[in-house]
C-alpha cells in the first residue's frame, strides 16, 4: 500500500520523474517500431533458397540430420533403391571388371552385383514416363537413340559409349540404374536431379531404345515385381498392358 | 449593396471547376501509367548476374529442357535454381578453362552457392505455385516469355495483380496441351478456342469464380 501511494504521490515529486521516463520510453518504443517495420512484400520468413542470417552456413533450407528417415521411406528394398542384389557387397562378391575402349573411356565389363530384372512393373506408362525423362536429362549427351551423339557431345563433351552394342545390351538393368544414381566416368551422379522411380522409368526406356535399334535380338524386359506377370521380350515389347505401378513407388522418392 | 463579385466571376468559377476535374483525371491517369511502368514493375529490365549465363545459348542453341536445371518445377511451388553441381555436369569437361566460368568453378571448389540476382520476385503476400500451373496447362513461355531468345533473362510481364487476374478470369485463352508446356515456340493460335475449352474441361480447371477468389492467392 505504501508503495502504491508513493507511486501516485504528487507531493514527493517522484511521480513526475517517472512520468517523463515513461514518456521517453514510449517515444523510444515508437521509434523502435518504426525501425522494425516490415514490408508485407518482404516478410520475415524464409522461402526456398533464401539466405539465412541465423545459421552459420547461411542456408535457410536446412539439411536433414544424418540418418533421418521420413515415414515410409526406410529404403529397405535394396533392389529398388540401389539396383543391386541382396548379396552385393559381401566378402564373397566377385569384383567388377573394367576395360578401356578406343577413346579412353573406362567401361564396366562384368556386372556381378547388378539386378537382372526390374524391381517395378514394366508397363507402357513406365516406358512413356521414361521417354519423357530421358529427353530431359539423358538426351543432351546420349542422343535420341542412345548412340552417344547428343548436342553436348557435339559441343565437345567426351563421347559416352553407345547403348547399342552387345556389352550394354547384355548388361543387367541394375547397372544402368547404378550409373544414373552414382555416375560413372565423366558422367556425374544424377541422383539429385532424378527421383528413384524416374530412374527405373529411364532404364526401361533405355531398354526400349536398345530393342528399337536391334529388333531381332532377344533383349528381355522382365520384372521381379509380382504386380507384373507378363514377361516382355523383344517380339512382344512395349505392348504390356498399362497398369498403375505400386502407389508407394511413384515419384517423390529421392 | 453593391455586388461582391463581378459578372465574369461566374466564368472563372466554371472554368476552375472544369480544370480541377481535368487535372484530377490527368493525375489519376499519370498514376496508373507510372504504377505500370517498368520503372516500378521491373518489366523488360535485364539483370546483371554474377555469371554471364545465357538462356539463349543453353535453351535456344543447345536445346536443353527447362527441367534439366529447374528440376522442382513439377513438384514444388518453386521451380528451383540449380546447384552448381548441375553446371558442372557439363562444364567439368567443356569450357572448363574459360575465364567466364571461373565464378562457377570457384563456387564448386569452395562449396559456396553462386548468388544469382532474382529476376521474378512476387510480393510475399501472394501465394504462387509453379507445379499447379504446369499441371493445368500453363506453359513456361506464357508467363516468362521466350526465354530461348534471352541472353540475359528479364521479366516479360508486370507480375501485377491485374496481369494474374487476366488469366485467372479466362484461363481458356492461355492454356495449352501438357505435352507443349516446355515448348518455347508455342503459339496460342495453334489451337482453336473450342480445343482450348476442351482442355480446360479435361484438366479440370476450376471456375473463374474459384480462381479469382481472394484466398486462392492471398492465403
Image: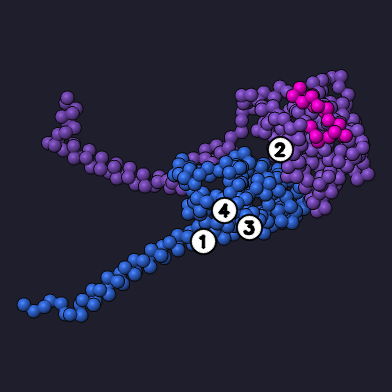
Which residue is label 1 attached to?
Answer: B38
Q: Which residue is mark 4?
A: B173
- The residue at the point 73 percent across, 41 percent down is A133
Mark 2 falls on what kind of element?
Answer: loop
Under circle 3, the secondary element is: helix
Which secondary structure lies at badge 4? helix
Q: Which residues are magenta?
A: A222-240
Q: Nearer the viewer, residue B162 or A50?
A: B162
Q: Let me know if residue A192 appears in the view.
A: yes
| Disc 3: which residue | B189
Q: How far, Cα to Cα, is label 4 from label 1?
A: 25 Å
Quadrant assignment, res B7: bottom left
On the image, numbered disc 2 is attached to which residue? A194
Please state the chain letter of the residue tagged with numbered disc 4 in the rendered image.
B
Query: To which quarter of the image does residue B70 belong?
Result: top right
Q: Is there a contact, CB below 8 Å, between mark 1 and mark 3?
A: no
Do tags 1 and 2 sit on the same chain? Answer: no
Q: Are marks 3 and 4 in contact (CB under 8 Å)?
A: no
Amino acid at each position: 500500500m505504501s508503495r502504491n501511494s508513493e507511486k501516485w504521490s504528487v507531493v514527493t515529486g517522484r511521480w513526475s520523474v517517472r512520468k517523463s521516463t515513461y514518456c521517453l520510453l514510449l517515444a523510444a518504443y515508437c521509434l523502435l517500431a518504426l525501425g522494425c517495420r516490415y514490408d508485407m512484400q518482404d516478410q520475415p520468413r524464409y522461402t526456398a533458397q533464401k539466405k539465412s542470417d541465423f545459421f552459420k552456413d547461411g542456408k535457410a533450407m536446412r539439411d536433414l540430420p544424418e540418418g533421418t528417415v521420413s515415414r515410409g521411406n526406410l529404403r529397405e528394398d535394396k533392389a529398388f533403391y540401389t539396383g543391386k542384389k541382396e548379396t552385393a557387397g559381401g566378402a564373397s562378391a566377385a569384383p567388377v571388371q573394367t576395360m578401356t575402349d578406343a577413346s579412353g573411356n573406362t567401361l564396366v565389363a562384368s556386372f556381378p552385383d547388378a539386378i537382372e530384372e526390374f524391381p517395378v512393373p514394366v508397363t507402357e506408362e513406365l516406358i512413356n514416363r521414361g521417354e519423357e525423362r530421358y529427353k530431359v536429362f539423358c538426351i543432351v549427351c546420349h542422343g535420341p537413340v542412345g548412340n552417344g551423339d547428343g548436342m553436348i557431345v557435339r559441343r565437345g563433351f567426351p563421347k559416352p559409349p553407345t547403348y547399342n552394342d552387345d556389352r550394354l545390351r547384355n548388361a543387367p538393368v541394375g547397372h544402368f540404374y547404378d550409373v544414373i544414381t552414382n555416375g560413372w566416368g565423366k558422367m556425374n551422379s544424377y541422383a539429385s536431379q532424378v527421383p528413384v522411380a524416374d530412374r527405373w522409368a529411364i532404364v526401361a526406356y533405355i531398354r526400349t531404345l536398345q530393342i528399337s535399334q536391334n529388333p531381332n535380338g532377344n533383349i528381355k524386359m522382365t520384372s521381379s515385381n509380382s504386380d507384373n506377370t507378363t514377361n516382355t521380350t523383344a517380339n512382344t515389347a512395349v505392348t504390356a498392358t498399362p497398369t498403375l505401378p505400386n502407389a508407394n513407388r511413384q515419384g517423390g522418392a529421392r | 449593396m453593391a455586388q461582391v463579385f463581378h459578372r465574369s466571376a461566374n466564368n472563372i468559377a466554371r472554368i476552375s471547376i472544369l480544370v480541377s476535374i481535368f487535372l484530377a483525371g490527368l493525375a489519376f491517369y499519370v498514376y496508373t501509367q507510372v504504377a505500370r511502368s517498368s520503372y516500378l514493375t521491373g518489366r523488360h529490365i535485364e539483370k546483371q548476374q554474377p555469371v554471364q549465363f545465357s538462356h539463349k545459348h543453353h535453351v535456344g542453341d543447345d536445346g536443353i529442357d527447362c527441367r534439366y536445371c529447374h528440376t522442382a518445377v513439377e513438384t514444388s511451388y518453386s521451380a528451383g535454381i540449380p546447384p552448381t553441381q548441375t553446371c558442372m555436369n557439363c562444364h567439368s569437361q567443356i569450357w572448363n578453362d574459360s575465364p567466364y566460368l571461373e565464378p562457377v568453378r570457384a563456387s564448386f571448389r569452395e562449396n559456396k552457392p553462386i548468388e544469382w540476382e532474382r529476376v521474378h520476385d512476387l510480393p510475399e503476400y501472394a501465394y504462387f505455385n509453379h507445379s499447379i500451373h504446369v499441371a493445368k496447362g500453363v506453359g513456361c513461355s506464357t508467363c516468362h516469355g521466350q526465354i530461348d531468345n534471352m541472353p540475359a533473362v528479364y521479366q516479360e510481364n508486370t507480375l501485377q495483380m491485374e496481369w494474374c487476374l487476366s488469366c485467372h478470369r479466362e484461363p481458356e485463352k492461355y492454356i495449352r496441351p501438357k505435352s507443349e508446356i516446355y515448348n518455347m515456340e508455342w503459339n496460342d493460335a495453334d489451337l482453336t478456342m473450342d480445343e482450348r475449352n476442351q482442355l480446360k474441361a479435361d484438366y479440370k480447371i476450376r471456375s473463374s469464380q474459384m480462381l479469382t477468389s481472394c484466398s486462392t492467392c492471398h492465403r
